[in-house]
Amino acid sequence: MNNSKTKVAVIGLGNIGKAIATNLVKGNHSVILASRDNEKTKALAGQLGNLATIKEIAVAIREADVIIPAIYFNALKEFFQTFSKELEGKIIVDVSNPIAPDGNGGFKKIIGETESAAKILSDFIPKNAKLIKAFGTLGAASLSGEAFSQPEQKVLFYASDSTNSNIKVEELITHSGFAPLHIGGLNNAIRIEVFGDLH
């Protein structure tokens, strides 16, 4: 295996995006940062140091092998349409959870009880792109707090139909301070989404 690390872009720097980017840099993996909020992007890049570079969203997607859009489930279809050309042939990691506040201090699922966000999104991804479900099983606090735990690393589940993309995703999960565990194809993604038995 060659020594060059997988090029990864984190798009959207809310709590989850920030946690993923921070963990990757902690694991000595460079990361491309992109978001609509330039100030937020600059601030995070400043914190993360020289392993983080800032790019426009379209450029970030073009330059990376793996794209992690850390944006709301409802915004992902539009994201896929807007950047369909750039996303062709890329590995896209879906971290989304299809939830909204339920008005009682909790959350409710905004898709059908038996529906999976990853399965729904897999119909919208650009041609030749691969969708993998990962990083969304933990909240931002757990992603930050549980990474690089000793003596044993915590497991991070992922689901994918495309086995040849797994090596890249496992590399990113490992460099993020977790032990990757493949739970099968996207038809199993519902298990690692919110309210799933492995979430």
Image (tube, rainbow, N blue to C red):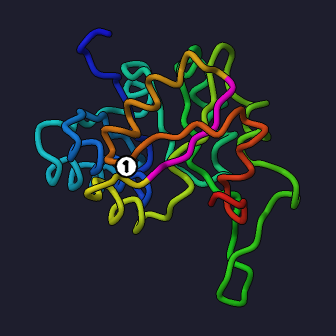
Q: Is residue 52 left or right of residue 152?
A: left
Which is nearer the eye, 6 or 155? 155
Name the residue type under label 1.
Ile
Q: Residue at x 55, y 30 (%)?
A: 92
**SS for tag 1?**
helix
Find out whether residue 160 is within the magenta segment. Answer: yes
Looking at the picture, does residue 18 appear above or below residue 67? below
Q: Is residue 2 left or right of residue 159?
A: left
Image location of residue 23, percent across then percent down: 29, 49
Which is nearer the eye, 124 or 29? 29
Image location of residue 122, percent across then percent down: 74, 32
Q: Is residue 174 left or right of residue 39?
A: right
Looking at the picture, does residue 198 appear above or below residue 35? below
Say which quadrant the N terminus sits in: top left
Q: Residue furthest bottom?
A: 104
Q: Residue at x 38, y 28 (%)?
A: 60
Image location of residue 176, percent across then percent down: 33, 44
Find out whether residue 45 is within the magenta segment. Answer: no
Q: Quadrant of residue 108?
A: bottom right
Q: Which residue is mark 1?
A: 20
Q: Quadrant of residue 179?
A: top left
Looking at the picture, does residue 178 appear above or below residue 139? above
Q: Residue furthest left?
A: 50
Image location of residue 193, percent across then percent down: 67, 55
Q: Which residues are magenta?
A: 155-161
Q: Residue at x 26, y 56 (%)?
A: 151
Q: Residue at x 57, y 41 (%)?
A: 158
